[in-house]
Amino acid sequence: MGDMNIKVDGEPSKEDPEEHRVRLEALPGDQARADGLEAPAPTRLYGRRWMIVLLFSSYSLCNSYQWIQYGIINNIFTRFYGVDAFTIDWMSMIYMLTYIPFIFPVTWLLDRKGLRVVALVATALNCAGTWVKVASVRPDLFPVTFLGQFCCSLAQVFILGMPSRIASVWFGSEEVSTACSIGVFGNQLGIAIGFLVPPILVPNVDDMDELAHHISIMFYITAGVATFLFILVVFVFQERPKLPPTQAQATARSIPPEQYSYTASILRLLRNKPFILLIITYGLNVGCFYAVGTLLNRMIIDHYPGEEVNAGRIGLTIVIAGMVGSLICGVWLDRTKTYKQTTLAVYFMSLVGMAVFAATLSLGHLWVVFITAGALGFFMTGYLPLGFEFAVELTYPESEGTSSGLLNCSAQVFGIIFTICQGKIIDKFGTLAGNIFLCVFLLIGTVMTGFIKSELRRQNANQQAQAAEASDGHSESLDAPSVVKEVRF
C-alpha cells in the first residue's frame, strides 16, 4: 500500500501567539481556518495505519468472543457450575454493567494518555482474565471464572470506544468510515466466533470430568491467543502518525493540552441536542442486539430442544450478516456522506428484521430462522459503525473517544434493562412476547432518529480547509509556486 505525503510550504504566522489563540477561541474551529487565520497544515497518510486498525480489530475480536462464550451454551455451564440460567446470563451482562461506571475514567485516560496506553491496558486485562478462567475449571470454582470474566469485561471498556478514534487519528477523510467499520468488524467477528466455537469445543456430555476437559481446552486456546495479541500490541501498536492524516485532525492536534477540559467537553456534548437524541436511539438499537445475543440460546432451545450447536450457528449468521452490513455501510458513508439518511434507513430495517424474526421463530423450521436471523443481523449489527461515525460528525471537534463512550454507555444501560426484562417476559409469556417487547423500543428509536438534525461538522471542517488550501495555492501560483505535493510509494 502506498503512502501519500502532502507537504505544504507557506509563510509562518507573524502574529502574537496569545492574540492568535484568542482569535481562534472567538470562532469555531472550522471557521477559523476558513477565514484564513492560518495556513493549511501538512498532512500525510501512512501505510502503517492498516496494521494499526487490524491489530486493534484482532484484540477486540478476542475480547468480544468472551462476551457470549458462556451464554451460548448456557445450559451446559448451568449444569457444570451448579447455578441457575439467570446467573449464567450475568456472565454476559457483566460486560454491560462494568462499562457504565468505568467509561468516564477510561475516556479521560484516552484523552490524557492516548491510544497506545489504552491499548496496552486493554490487552493486559484481557490476557489476565483469560488465564484466571484457565484456573477456574472446577464445579466449585464459579466465583473464580466470574472474576476472570470481570477482568475481560473491564478490558472491553478500553476497547469499545476506540474504532472512531483510531479512524480519525490515522485515516484520511475519504476512508474514516471504512476504517471505523473495520474496527467494529473485529468486535462483531469475535461475537460470531463466540456463537460458533463454544458449542463445538464443549459438547453437552454427561461425564463431568470429560466436560471439564473440554472447557479447559476452550479456555487454554483463548488464553494463548490473548497472550500473543498482548505481545504484538507491546511491540507494534503506535500512538499516532508523525503527521496528521487530515486538516480536521491537524486542528484537533493544535489545541494545547492545558486548554482542554474533559469535564467541559462532557458538558458541551450533553448540551448538544442532536447528539443526545443519537445517544438514546443508539442505546435502544444496540441494547436490543445485546438482549437477543444473550438470550438466543434460551429462545432457540425453547422451540428446538437439543439444538445448542444450531443456536450457535444462528448467532454466527446474525453477526456475519452484520459484519457485511457494517462494511457496506462504512464504504457507502465514505462515498455519499449521507449519515442521517443511511442511519434512519438501517434503523427502520432493523425494526422490520426484528418483527420478522419474532414472527418466524416458532414456525418449526430452522432454515427459516437462519434466513430471518441473517436479515436481522445485517441491519441491527450493521448499525453499529453508523452510530459511531454519525456521533463524530455531530460532535466535532470533541474527542471521538468521549462521544463513542457515551454511546456505548447508553447501549450497556439499555442492554441490561432489555436482557433482564425480555428474559422475565420469555419465562412468563414466551419468546414471541419477549421479541415484541424489543420491537416496540425499536419503533420508538426509529421515530426519534427521524428527529435528529444532521450537522456534519467534521466534513465541513475538511471541506473548508481544502477550499482554503485551493484558494491559497491559486493566489500564490501567480508569482512562484509555494505548494508542493509529493506522492511516495
Image: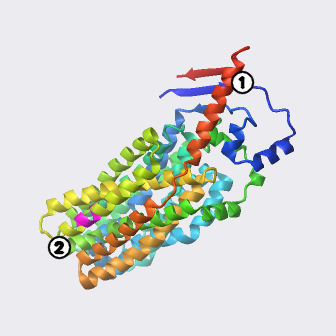
Please report whichever mark, 2 or 1, sits nearer to the chain's N-terminal start: 1
Q: Does residue 128 show up?
A: no
Q: Residue under circle 2?
A: 303
| Viewer-nearest residue: 15 or 487 | 15
Placement of 353 over or under 415, stated as above or below: above
Amino acid at the residue labelled 1: Asp
Q: What are the residue bounds of the magenta stretch? A: 353-357
Residue 15 within the magenta-colored segment of the rendering: no
Question: How many residues crowd around disc 1 within 10 Å: few (fewer than 14), some, or many (20 or more)?
Answer: some
Task: Report how many numbered discs are placed on residues in the image.
Answer: 2
| Viewer-nearest residue: 352 or 198 | 352
Residue 385: x %, y % from top left: 44, 52
Q: Is residue 281 left or right of residue 196?
A: right
Amino acid at the residue labelled 2: His
Question: How many residues crowd around disc 2 within 10 Å: few (fewer than 14), some, or many (20 or more)?
Answer: some
**Residue at x-position 30% and y-position 78%:** 78
Q: Residue under circle 1?
A: 9
Placement of 217 over or under 42, stated as above or below: below
Q: Are marks 2 and 1 in contact (CB under 8 Å)?
A: no
**Residue at x-position 59% and y-position 42%:** 460
Outermost residue, top side: 479
SS assignment at label 1:
loop
Q: Is residue 307 left or right of residue 262?
A: left
Outermost residue, bottom side: 428
**Coloured how?**
rainbow
